[in-house]
Image (cartoon, rainbow, N blue to C red):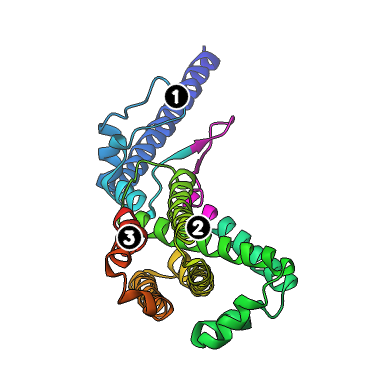
Amino acid sequence: MRSNIIFLLCFFCLSHLTFAQNSSTRENDSIAALELSSLVPNDSMSLEKEPIKVDSSNPFEIINSGLPADVKEAKSQTGISKTDTSQHGFQFPAINAPKKSQNFLFIVLLIYFGLLTALVTLNRSLLGKILRGFFNENYLRMMFRVQNPSVYLSYALIYLFFVLNAGLFVYLLFKRENVLGARTDLALFFWCVLGLGAIYGLKHLILRLIGAIFPVNREVQFFGFTLLIFNSLLGLLLLPVNAVLAFAPEWLSKYMIPLGLILFVLVYFYRQLRGLLIGSKYLTGNPFHFFVYLCTVEIAPIIIL
């Protein structure tokens, strides 16, 4: 009997100690939870309350409306608009590819410098002769008299160089002013070069027809050669203008278009002055024919351009 009573007392004491220990453990856990909740900011609590919208088509994409305001602002400041998702579900910011127009201009200018190198290799003295003939009419006449088949290729390439550079300048002008913006870079560049080539090709064709019909063949040929030399020098001057206009900062490139137009105008009027000197003896006796020539060969191509 005494042993039973002692057993019951021991059992009662052990159960009481276990209950007290469990109660104190629960109380400590609740206190720790309250302290932890007091340290959590309100934004994170609002994040749990605000539902997150998920695109059903992409299980890895989360729409920004479920993000806190400070996260949205940080994302907008970084400039990342798209994300790239790998097969493991991680999201990486997409890297913007370089502009296609910049790559296109780099390739075009690289070809231009290669063509200029080929010209210098074929005829090292050609560039100096062009510059000297531009300022000295007597030296230009001497260049016209001593032409031979060996320099025909150099003259053809240097004239092609002018057409390409003038076409690139017009292309950059159209791109800057957003003219024909729907066309691709290659198509717009092609039409600019083709248009300028057609205008100057038509001008030389008309000069040959005038020389074949009227007894002014020698003067017309010399004027055509003058046109070639002057335009060749203009093409050389437009190469650095195009390079700066294509890749320089905005504060510097905005001055290149007026500079290029000034070069066009100065070379044009100086060439017309030299043309008047070439045909001065025919100007007083045939003013009507000279007027017709100005309208068809000089004024009309500028209006078309």
Q: What residue type is labelled 2?
A: Ala
Q: Which amino acid does label 1 sit on?
A: Asn
In the figure, 277 relative to 195: above or below?
below
Residue occupying image coordinates x 27% and y 65%:
288
Q: Regarding mark 1 in the picture, which secondary structure is present there?
A: loop
Pointer 1 or 2: first along the chain: 1
Q: Nearer the viewer, mark 1 or mark 3?
A: 3
Pointer 1 or 3: first along the chain: 1
Number of marks: 3
The residue wearing badge 2 is 212
- Quarter of the figure that contains the C terminus: bottom left
Q: What residue type is labelled 3?
A: Ile
- The magenta-colored residue range is 84-104
Q: Nearer the viewer, mark 2 or mark 3?
A: 2
Asked if labels 3 and 2 touch by Cβ distance under 8 angstroms, the answer is: no
The residue wearing badge 1 is 58
Q: Regarding mark 3 in the picture, which secondary structure is present there?
A: helix
Spatial CA span between label 1 and label 3: 57 Å
